[in-house]
């Protein structure tokens, strides 16, 4: 009987030697610029946070605006111009809210880029601009990016445990609005965390200059975590709803998304005396229902770990494994 030999044929596919970037573009080509309003998110930190898609649109747009009053990047707009290779028109509150037709002019026949720090839908002002474009039958395309609303998870608290986001404005001697308090109270009652966005004042006029019609602007101001904590305690004292107190835990956040971002955990009393350095700042009031993993993560940022342990072990917080 003759022995038989079995051969196994193995096919090894071969691929053409190509540039991986070129191959990527052939599969998913860069956007074709069309005549419309492009609302482009820039991310949180510097000129390099823009997406590839957003950058291509900026390079080819007829006009490029930068919304410059609801938030700021960590770099000056001249650095953006150098990186993008384009002149940028700064769009202040007056231009965006009162003279939006200037931005939308010819946007139906020319491509116009409107740059927003964070994500385009992070402020109601941007939604208003898009509604105005819709009324004028101007096509709109949005290019998304990271914003405080999702990047806040870097502090260690889980995003799905957050409730309503609120804003804190600078108090004045005669104006101390407390509408934020009611939303915080609703979050507190169901145990959720609260993200608090802090006020910035860019190209603002004093009451006197505004009344006299003088185009004289105050120096920029950026609320700090300490100022926010003090105003929160002041409001609790006046409202008396027991939404929080001096021993309530909170997380101070500074320069989120940058190389030197900072998180500081403490009671509102501790944060009222804290210094987290340059802007921008935000604050998170920690909710009652907190997971053990969240506790472990944020404990490393505590100003005083012994006090943190004492507070988190108290009756105000329900720990969940």
Image (tube, rainbow, N blue to C red):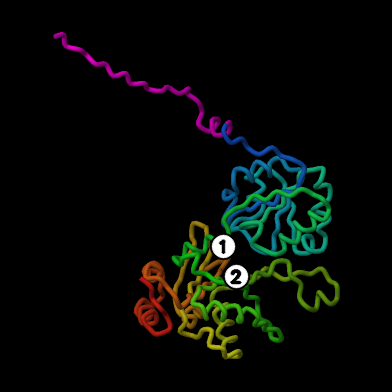
Q: Where's residue 188, x and y in %?
A: 52, 79
Give the prevailing secondary structure in the magenta stretch: loop
Q: Is residue 318 depicted above or below 71 in this figure?
A: below
Q: Quadrant of residue 313?
A: bottom left
Tags 2 and 1 touching, CB below 8 Å: yes
**Residue at the spot of label 2:** 197
Q: Nearer the viewer, residue 288 or 297?
A: 288
**Residue at the spot of label 1:** 148
Q: Is residue 242 depicted above or below 31 in this figure?
A: below
Say whether disc 2 or disc 1 marks the residue closer to the N-terminus: 1
Asked if the magenta segment contains residue 13, the reply would be yes
Q: Looking at this view, name the residue that lies furthest to the left.
A: 1
> Around disc 1, counting alpha carbons within 10 Å, would you say few (fewer than 14), some (14 to 19), or many (20 or more)?
some
Q: Looking at this view, name the residue that lies furthest to the right.
A: 212
Q: Quadrant of residue 309?
A: bottom left
Q: Nearer the viewer, residue 305 or 88?
A: 305
Residue segment shown in magenta: 1-26
């Amino acid at each position: 009987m003759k022995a038989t030999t079995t051969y196994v044929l193995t096919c090894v596919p071969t691929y053409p030697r190509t540039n991986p970037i070129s191959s990527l573009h052939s599969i998913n080509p860069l956007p074709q610029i069309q005549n419309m309003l492009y609302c482009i998110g820039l991310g949180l930190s510097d000129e390099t946070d823009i997406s590839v898609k957003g950058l291509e649109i900026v390079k080819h747009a007829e006009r490029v605006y930068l919304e410059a009053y609801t938030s700021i990047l960590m770099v000056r707009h001249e650095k953006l111009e150098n990186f993008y290779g384009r002149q940028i028109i700064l769009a202040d509150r007056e231009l965006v809210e009162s003279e939006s037709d200037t931005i939308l002019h010819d946007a139906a026949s020319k491509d116009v880029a409107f740059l927003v720090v964070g994500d385009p839908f992070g402020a109601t002002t941007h939604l208003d601009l898009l509604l105005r474009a819709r009324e004028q039958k101007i096509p709109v395309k949005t290019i998304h990016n990271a914003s405080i609303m999702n990047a806040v998870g870097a502090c260690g608290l889980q995003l799905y445990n957050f409730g309503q986001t609120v804003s804190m404005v600078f108090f004045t001697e005669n104006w101390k609005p407390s509408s934020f308090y009611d939303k915080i109270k609703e979050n507190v009652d169901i145990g959720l965390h609260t993200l608090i966005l802090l006020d910035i004042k860019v190209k603002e006029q004093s009451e006197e200059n505004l009344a006299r019609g003088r185009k004289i602007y105050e120096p920029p101001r950026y609320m700090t975590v300490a100022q926010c904590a003090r105003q929160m305690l002041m409001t609790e004292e006046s409202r008396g709803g027991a939404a929080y107190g001096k021993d309530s835990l909170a997380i101070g956040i500074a320069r989120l998304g940058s190389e030197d971002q900072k998180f500081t955990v403490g009671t509102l009393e501790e944060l009222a005396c804290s210094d987290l350095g340059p802007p921008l700042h935000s604050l998170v009031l920690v909710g009652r229902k907190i997971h053990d993993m969240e506790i472990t993560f944020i404990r490393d940022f505590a100003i005083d770990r012994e006090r943190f342990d004492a507070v988190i072990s108290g009756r105000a917080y329900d720990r969940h494994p």
